[in-house]
């Protein structure tokens, strides 16, 4: 659409059917969803309980950590590839 068409559309009166479209749409959605106003269903409680149980069970399991031997890190070590001199010279 060009600018003239948009200006005509903006200046046109709104059809009276559109004035109440929000109320009609929302009432139709509410009528097509049985139990929407009843709150939480038993299935919601069951799914929440299962998820809660799974989370607690997973958190209670002992974690196994990989133990690595500590290494001394020193920038002045001769074998350090990230030593300042190696970075400046471009050697490894």
Image (tube, rainbow, N blue to C red):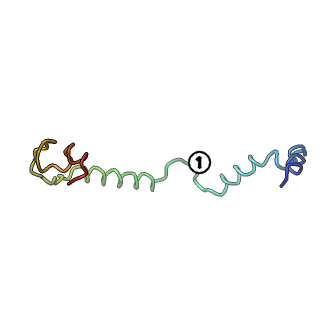
Residue topped by disc 1: 37
Which of these two is toward me, 79 or 58?
79
Which of these two is toward me, 60 or 45?
60
Residue at 21% across / 42% down in the picture? Answer: 84
Q: Hey, which residue is sitting farthest front in the picture?
A: 89
Which of these two is toward me, 26 or 58?
58
Measuring from the top left, give residue 17's x and y in whole percent.
Answer: 85, 50
Residue 45 placement, left or right of 33: left
For the C terminus, give its image quadrant: bottom left
Q: Residues within 10 Å of mark 1 (few under 14, many from 20)?
A: few
Residue 67 placement, left or right of 7: left
Residue at 65% across / 52% down in the picture? Answer: 30
Residue at 19% across / 51% down in the picture? Answer: 81
Measuring from the top left, give residue 1's x and y in whole percent.
Answer: 83, 55
Residue at 12% across / 51% down in the picture? Answer: 79
Q: How many marks?
A: 1
Measuring from the top left, give residue 5's x and y in whole percent.
Answer: 88, 51
Residue 66 placement, left or right of 10: left
Q: Circle 1 — which element? A: loop
């Amino acid at each position: 659409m060009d600018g003239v068409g948009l200006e005509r559309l903006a200046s046109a009166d709104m059809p009276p059917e559109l004035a109440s479209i929000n109320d009609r749409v929302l009432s139709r959605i509410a009528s097509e969803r049985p139990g929407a106003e009843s709150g939480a269903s038993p299935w919601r409680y069951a799914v929440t309980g299962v998820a809660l149980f799974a989370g607690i069970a997973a958190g209670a399991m002992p974690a196994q950590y990989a133990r690595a031997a500590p290494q001394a890190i020193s920038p002045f070590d001769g074998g350090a590839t990230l030593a300042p001199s190696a970075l400046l010279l471009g050697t490894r």
